[in-house]
Amino acid sequence: MHRTTLKLPKYRGLGRATAVIAPIVLLVGINLTRAVDSPPVPQISASNYRTLDVAGPQYSPPSRGIVPSPAAPNPICAVDCANHCPPGYEATWKALGAVWGFQEWAQGEYVGRARLPHVPTYRLRVDDQMEFIYRVTRDKTPGPYRINIGDEMQVESAAETELQRTLVVLPDGTITLPLIGSVSAAGLTVEQLRQSLDEKFKKYYNEPAITVTPIKVDTQLEDLRFTVSGRSGFGGQVLPARITPEGTIQLPVVGSVPAQGLTIGEFRVELAERYDEHLEGMEVMPVLTQRAPRYVYVLGEVQQPGRYTLEAPTTVMQAISMAGSWTIGAHITQVVVFRRADDWRLIATTLDLRAALLGRSPCPAAEIWVSDADLVIVPKSKLLRGTNFIELVFTKGLYGVIPFNGGVNYTVFRELTPVGP
């Protein structure tokens, strides 16, 4: 009869200590990852919605009919997330059916559809760039022309030819004539100025018979046109401007004009009223040339985290795709979206994108539209956090402090030695 002796591996020094500590640290790491997980948060996911396998009879697709074409002869079965599903339900792939318009334009689908407007009304915001087109209307004014500073007037008298002269309205709004000196002219009509001069000259002439003839008028309009031409840089009557952080635009003559939150039409009315207070005969047309940049920020477990420009309506899954998709170990069942409201208060939600990103849900309720300055965070999964913890402790922690140069033989049954009878 032979007996065998089991010889266990011999651990010496640090090898034995490491073999004892490793399982303990592993258990501690797993417990810590469980402890740091936040309590369950209500999420927008398929679990919060009742599923609907087939569309109800009252929710049928449009009855326009499917018209095949040589480029697209076969109908496409799809799920219509609006017409195949009543409110409060989330359709599944069993709701597949004929959907009109899936490839309505066939080979022309790449051009893109007109669709509905992005917003019913666009309102101006900070950093929007605009151009202002100035145009002299040449329209008949409702009242008599009033003299402006800088206008040129010719004054004549039938009684005394030496009174004839051409005068410019001075910055203080007056003109100067012999005998009577300075006379106020700005703001008066031509007839009012003639009557004023005639009355003053009666002290020196029985019948002065004063005549006032405008030579150069609308000087404020000319000054504005020269100002716009000089600032525009290309000789036209177009002035570029940008909405400042305080929500206003600086324009010649009228100064600071509020623009933040106004539509283009409302802003045009505001400009017209302000310019009419200073001068007549000028029309100002505001044109939006470039919208302020809009961004979405994607962080966490994605291939390329960073800031991305929103150039068109974008959903949260599209934002993740711009960041290169999610990485292995991403917690896609609890994607966090932070958003700033109109009054800058912070609001947030969590989204369960697992079913959608894995192709299991055709109409995911969590596929929401992102807004300007949204922050999308794809967190780490429990497994990835545990892996990172172990790597931190062993690679950068324990082994970094206590260097280990030996090796450990994990072959338990290393040697079976036969023993004689």
Image (cartoon, grey):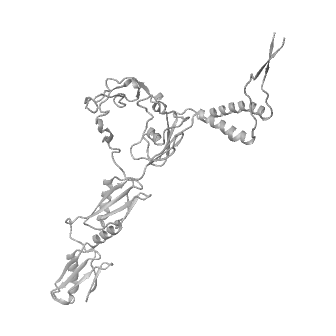
Q: Which residue is drawn at 16% across and 84% down?
A: 209
- Quarter that holds the C terminus: top right
Tell me: 190 left or right of 294: left
Q: Residue at x 43, y 26 (%)?
A: 50
Tell me: 213 left or right of 78: left
Residue 310: x and y in percent read: 42, 46
Toward the viewer: 347 or 316?
Answer: 316
Q: Indicate whether 203 appears above or below 225.
A: below
Toward the viewer: 181 or 262?
Answer: 262
Toward the viewer: 410 or 252?
Answer: 410
Residue 246: x and y in percent read: 44, 58
Toward the viewer: 248 or 317?
Answer: 317
Toward the top, the furthest residue is: 1
Residue 141 placement: quadrant: bottom left
Residue 243: x and y in percent read: 40, 58
Q: Indicate whether 217 appears above or below 119.
A: below
